[in-house]
Image (cartoon, rainbow, N blue to C red):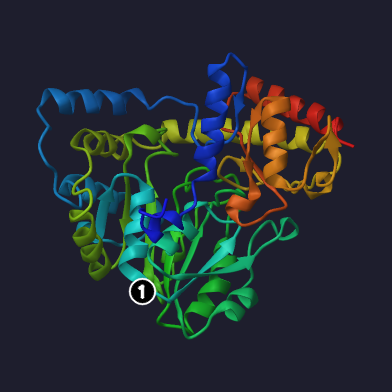
Amino acid sequence: MTFLSNRINNLSESQTIKMAKMGRELSAKGIDIINLSFGEPDFFTPDVVKQAAKKAIDENYSYYTPVSGYPDLRKAIAEKLKRENDLDYSFEQIVVSTGAKQSLANAVMCLVNPGEEVIVPTPYWVSYSEMIKLAEGETVFIDASVENNFKISAKQLEAAITPKTKLFMFSSPCNPTGSVYSHEELANLVAVFEKHPNIYIISDEIYEHINFVNKHASIASFPSIKDRVIIINGFSKSYAMTGWRIGYMAANKEIASACDKLQGQITSGTSSIAQMAALKAYQSGLETVLQMKEEFKKRRDTVYNLLKEIPNIKVNLPDGAFYFFPEVKNYFGKSYNNETIHNAEDLCLYLLNNAHVSTVTGEAFGNPDCIRLSYAASEKVLVEAVSRIKNALEKLS
């Protein structure tokens, strides 16, 4: 397709969306597919949030919204950051977007010049590298292994920095590994950033409330670097509002203003109805959020115990989010019915076609030896899914 731009031809398709699409195609043929490829809570949006959206429609919230979001919502976000995270932001430092993904893209596009380097620990969320590619930046990966719970060290960070480094980009709790950086671990990274005052940090905290170990620690809580941190968050995971498409960033005023400028030329303001629903979500407290977290924790423990029973895979216990990222390379080179597994993508296709379970190749997240499983499904479904995976893997020899 030579008539298309190099920009789009060089862009990779999202593997999570690709696998979910393949699963839906098989489901349409009447095959019972269990989808563990999407990072989407299986809970419904809380009723109080839905009622707020209906009320907004009845009250004619049907006009264009400010590019950065309604002031009331931005103030509520700033109050949330103070109340829950002890972080001081004014509402002018908040930009509301159509999902945390747009907030991430806004930040990358506003910070990265062609040829500048962005450090990304692997495994990473699939879209990070593609956003950097769109900004014509260069991605520098730091590999983290299952033995270290997929977290990098300060020594690794220091070694990756060059005069061209502009940005560091990470998530905690992490998609796809569920890893959570403690306050002490973040402090070690901050000590490195303090020596390099020209590096900015994007901290993707969308899974903030799905944390099973400690109170959420934000790298923005360190005063020495706070002005260089761009917090990304949203409502999709904590409040089961994936389809509402609403997220936000908190950053210094110059960056927030730049992102407002960019967004004004691409989407303008986020849906008025979604904003009013989000406002009610933050006004309604954390009761439903904590209920969902406890359910996710039970599911995590169930799936972990089942995965440990499968031979030839290596799995750690995630501290947050709702994913497992098992190492499966011991199955590479094995075959069944003349189908040979050469890599993680082959294994995902094998599991889709033979176990009827949809997963995602770890290569999409920067680790080709792993696959990602989401446990955002009911416990009954998860038990069945892991049983199918185990049975399918047993057939490989």
Does 169 sit left or right of 153 as displayed?
left
Question: Residue at 67% of width from left, 44% of height from top?
Answer: 345
Residue 257 appears in the figure: yes
Residue 349: x and y in percent read 67, 35
Task: Estimate how packed mark 1 is, as few (under 14), some (14 to 19) or many (20 or more) residues with alpha carbons within 10 Å.
Answer: some
Residue 241 appears in the figure: no
Q: Nearer the viewer, residue 344 or 272?
A: 344
Residue 256 vertical position relative to residue 395 in the rendered view, above or below = below
Does 35 sit left or right of 308 as displayed?
left
Q: Residue furthest front?
A: 2
Q: Nearer the viewer, residue 385 or 113?
A: 113
Circle 1 residue: 113
- Identify which amino acid the numbered label 1 is placed on: Asn
Does 242 sit left or right of 386 as displayed?
left
Question: Residue at 65% of width from left, 47% of height from top?
Answer: 318
Question: Residue at 58% of width from left, 75% of height from top?
Answer: 157
